[in-house]
Image (spheres, rainbow, N blue to C red):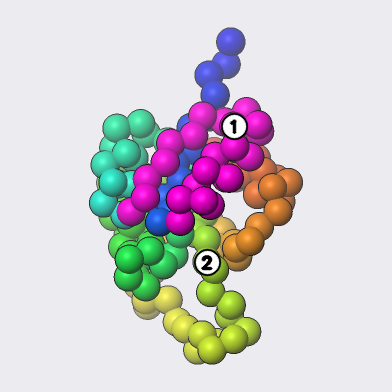
Amino acid sequence: MESKKKILLIDDDKDFLMATKLILEKGGYEVFLAEDGKSGLEMARKVSPDLAIIDMMMETWSEGFNVVSRLRTSETGKQIPLIMLSAVDLQGPYQSFEPPENLPTVDLVLHKPIKADELLGHISTLLKKQ
């Protein structure tokens, strides 16, 4: 039997983590959770996920970027698809928000809230490219 693909979710919103975990598990994935960047990086080292979903803003506005940067320079995260989530309304007061210049590559930036089937579709597409 083929083993389930592992997805790491890093977000400081517990409700979002639990709801998304259920969606992903129903989609047939094994899900690992982390509530901040530091534990997310530790979890990535431990479980070697096939894909990671990272919230852009956690304790600080740049924490998500720091996690992506650290993942991209680690053995575990160098090759895996990374999805960054943002609850920032880019039409609103953050219109001028610019990610750091040397932002390491993420495969996709999605805006919260996201529909379950959309999220599963994006994940499936990214995992097929691996």
Q: Which residue is mark 1?
A: 25
Amino acid type, label 1: Glu
Q: Secondary structure at mark 2?
A: strand
In the displayed structure, 50 sits above or below 96; it is above
Q: Which residue is mark 2?
A: 86
Direction from residue 23 to residue 5 in the image, left or right: left
Direction from residue 84 to residue 113 in the image, left or right: right
Is residue 81 among the parts visible in the rendering? no
For the C terminus, give its image quadrant. top right
Residue 28 pos. (x, y %): 62, 28
Most foreground residue, 14 or 76: 14
Instruction: Looking at this view, name the residue that lies furthest to the right.
Output: 117
Residue 36 pos. (x, y %): 33, 54
Instruction: Looking at this view, name the residue that lies furthest to the front.
Output: 15
In the displayed structure, 104 sits above or below 48; it is below
* Whole-number angstrom distance, CA of label 1 to CA of label 2: 22 Å
Most foreground residue, 81 or 7: 7
For the N terminus, give its image quadrant. top right
Q: Residues within 10 Å of mark 2 (few under 14, many from 20)?
A: some
Please identify the quarter of the rendering in which residue 98 is found. Answer: bottom left
In the displayed structure, 78 sits above or below 111; it is above
Q: Residue at x 54, y 39 (%)?
A: 21
The magenta segment is 13-36
Q: Secondary structure at mark 1?
A: helix
Amino acid type, label 2: Ser
Q: Is there a contact, CB below 8 Å, between mark 1 and mark 2? A: no
Instruction: Looking at this view, name the residue that lies furthest to the top.
Output: 1
